[in-house]
Image (tube, rainbow, N blue to C red):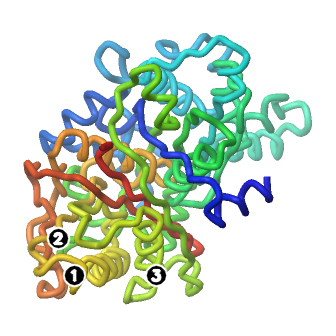
Amino acid sequence: MLLQALLYIEGEHEMRRVVVTGLGAITPLAAGIKTTWKRLLESSSGLSSTTTRGPAFETLPSKVAGLVPLGKREDCAWQAKDWLPAKEERQMALFAQYAVAAADEALNDAGWHPTSQADLEATGVTIGSGIGNLDEAYNTSVAFHEGGYRKVSPLFVPKLLINLAAGHVSIRHGFKGPNHAATTACTTGLHAIGDASRLIAFGDADVMVAGGAESCIHPLAIAGFARARSLAVDWNDEPAAASRPFDSQRAGFVIGEGAGVVVLEELEHAKARKANIYAEVKGYGLSSDAYHMTAPEENGEGAFLAMRAALKHASLKPEAIDYVNAHATSTILGDAAENRAIKRLLLGPDGRQSASEVNINSTKGAVGHLLGAAGAVEAIFTMLTIHNNVLPPTLNLVRPGDPPEEFDCNYVPNAAQQHTVNAALTNSFGFGGTNASLCLAKYR
């Protein structure tokens, strides 16, 4: 593998091109990507009160979350029995259930259901999670404390492991290629897709099922983020208004749950079977802030480095980027730092001539922050933006700022906009200063 990598780097082999042929998602807007996308473009909100989840949530300072809607699959809502046999449901953590459902949707969308040994060996999975199964860890800890050894389920460890989302998808479909899981906080979903694209580019697989999943709407998780002063607490009586990316009144993120999974495919493989192609993965950039556990540098240096690296791998100049799906979580520091990084990258001699020509949005206004699933779901939104030439809205954006003079780009406020998008960036950043940016483009 090392020799193969060196040959690629030295230019003796061309990197294989990677395209997107299938999409699947479970989100606070809907269980299913088609309805999620439709509701996103309609400026609908998937945010609601957590107090319906039980009395433990009522004592917390933040009472808003992006909850996957419960109900029948035919109504684009979630109940596990519509997606999984009872036995499999009992064996899986909720985040893994979301991942399996999103993967099924993506594979059906791609029309990829291999049966030959060669195809199964050429298909892999990389799906990660930021936190995973906090419910199981909490409940089992309490049960062990109160009742001892016999109160611990034999499924405790398998339901706790983050890589079991990828494992269950591999087992369900018989995929024998790479089986991998990233866990890099809120960058997880995008790292999973970027890493999977490189596995294809370097010849380790022809097809990869990739993404992220999260399901930690739990009082302990909310308490932890609230104690770190990360969450929005001023909009408990108006949940839909709580996540406000780039707005002057933004005051913290809204926690969310769900999963996003894509099918990535080597271009010639996709063409040979006449697969529908949504977009091409052109570049993937990674960086570290090397600065602070939870806060970015004010100038957004880490974000800038990741985006610059993605453009370098894509062999594109800044002027080629028509749209950026920002990580922007609705925090005061994070949104400002990313905004500065984007403007630094896209404005100037090789970029746009004025800030008003820079199109940026954050779909977290509609779904909240899905943590380890965020990057994957937002990458899917970016793929659909490219495919459909429409920019999803940034909800709750009344007055950009502060200061307003820095926030002078087009943030697609509150309503979708028609716009030709040939190339785009989608960003994800996580605690510990880990950053990723993926460059996607129309397949040509």
Quick check: marks 2 and 1 in contact, CB under 8 Å?
yes
Which comes before the other along the chain, label 2 or label 1? 1
Identify residue type, mark 1.
Leu
- Toward the front, the furthest residue is 12
Which comes before the other along the chain, label 3 or label 2? 3
Query: Percent position (x, y) of residue 429?
Result: 47, 67
Left or right of 67, for residue 216: right
Identify residue type, mark 3.
Pro
Left or right of 96, for residue 346: left
Left or right of 56, for residue 360: left
Q: Nearer the viewer, residue 391 or 161?
A: 391
Query: Percent position (x, y) of residue 45?
Result: 22, 44
Badge 2: residue crowd in 10 Å (few <14, some 14–19, many ≥20): many
**Count of picture labels:** 3
> In front of the other: label 1 or label 3?
1
Mark-to-mark CA distance, 3 and 2: 22 Å
Q: Secondary structure at mark 2?
A: loop
Report the residue marked by disc 2: 358
Report the residue marked by disc 1: 347
Badge 3: residue crowd in 10 Å (few <14, some 14–19, many ≥20): many
Quick check: marks 3 and 2 in contact, CB under 8 Å?
no
107, above or below 435, in the image? above
> In front of the other: label 3 or label 2?
2
Report the residue marked by disc 3: 296
Query: Percent position (x, y) of residue 295?
Result: 48, 80
Badge 1: residue crowd in 10 Å (few <14, some 14–19, many ≥20): some
Q: Quadrant of residue 166?
A: top right
Q: Which residue: 42% across, 38% down? A: 20
Which comes before the other along the chain, label 1 or label 3? 3
Q: Which residue: 40% across, 68% down? A: 311
User: What's the mark number on residue 90?
Assistant: none
